[in-house]
Image (cartoon, rainbow, N blue to C red):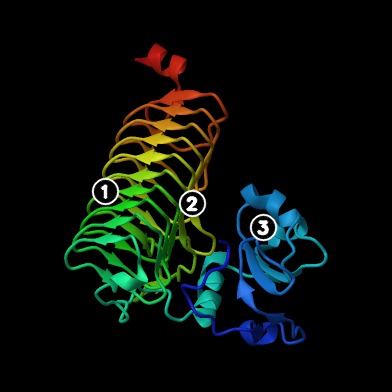
Amino acid sequence: MSKNFFFESNGPFKLNILFPNHPTSKIRIKDIKTLDKASKSDLSFFDSINYKDLAKNTKAACCITKENLKNYLPKTCEVIIVKSVLFELARITSKFYPFADIDYPDNSLKKPNNTKFPGVKFGNNVLIGKNVKIGKSTTIGSNTIIEQNVIVGKNCIIGSQIMIKNSFIGDNVVIQDGAKIGLKGFGFIPLKGKNFRIPHIGKTIIEDNVEIGASCTIDRGSIGDTIIGKNTFLDNQVHMAHNVKVGENCMIAGQVGFAGSSTLGNNVSIGGQAGISGHLKIGNNVKIGGGSGVVKDIPDDTIVMGYPAVPLKEFLKKN
């Protein structure tokens, strides 16, 4: 399910068209990918030392980066030094995908034809976009919208007043009332007079046996994908920003918030109203107490609590 057909690309472009300051390079760039997914025809980006291991092994044809990071990239990758990696990434992504910076309404929505979805039960006022696939024995509640190209697996329970777009949903998934899945995340470059929106061309992948509580919001990925692993359960009102990756068998209580691009291992438990900062790595079997603020990586088999979150024994000594 790595292919993304939710957004239509205007590419390919020659590199010297995308970056006029590199007039000698006429490499044809087909797409924009993360360091680990890029191929020899793709452009990638590298803006943090945290991703140096991915940078060393990338197969990207070229990469947008900063002067102090360029030496981590392989010689096979053409380096493009810029002042702001995120701004240049947003600018180039807008050329490839000019309609991914705002979630425009899906004009293909219509009442579902039951003959196209055998074994699926629909409530009242359900709208389905073109090329949607829904597995047998799935139930869709009233006033729910599933936009074009979404795939929903078998034996799912999709509640009422739900919006799903830009997503792949596995088998035996439960999504409670009011959830919003696959919408654009919070991303822009502050400029004088007018902010520059960052297009989000990724998708949301929800694997088998996941349960998502009422009124959760799960953003799609910006360049990569947002992923929720098998048998993970989310309580009500959880917010998950773009590119977050959650492992298997995780339990996340109500009102937990995730900033973008953080990664959780397997068997992670998070108490209510905890906050997870962006670009963090949370290990396997980690337990995070309710109301905690996580601002740095947490190794495997650790229990933390407090703001900022610290190992439980240290928290208890201070309190």
Label 1, label 2: how far apart the Cα atoms are: 18 Å
Q: Which mark is residue 129?
A: none
Mark 3 to mark 2: distance in Å? 16 Å
Q: Nearer the viewer, mark 1 or mark 3?
A: 1
What percent of the width, then of the height, locates residue 273?
A: 30, 36
* Residue beneath disc 1: 176
Q: Tell me the kind of residue under disc 1.
A: Gln
10 Å crowding of disc 2: few (<14), some (14-19), many (20+): many
Seen as rendered, the residue at the extreme top is: 317
Q: Residue at x 36, y 72 (%)?
A: 116
Which of the 4 image quadrants contains residue 235?
top left
Q: Please say whether residue 21 is visible from this viewpoint.
A: no
Q: Earlier in the sequence, mark 1 or mark 2?
A: 1
Query: Residue 180, percent across and down?
Result: 30, 58
Give the foreground label among 3 and 2: 2
Label located before the other in sequence (1 or 3): 3
Mark 3 element type: loop
**Front position in the image: 233 or 31:** 233
Per the image, the residue denoted by label 3 is 36
In the displayed structure, would residue 145 be above or below residue 18?
Answer: above
Q: How many marks?
A: 3
Label 2 SS: strand
Q: Is 23 placed above or below 147 here?
A: below
The image position of residue 247, as x and y in percent, is 51, 41
Left or right, 15 with respect to 263, comes to right
Asked if disc 3 and disc 2 are in contact, CB closer than 8 Å, the reply is no
**Residue 47 shows in the view:** yes
Q: For the C terminus, which image quadrant?
A: top left
Image-quadrant location for residue 108 = bottom left
Residue pointed to by mark 2: 227
Secondary structure type for disc 1 = loop
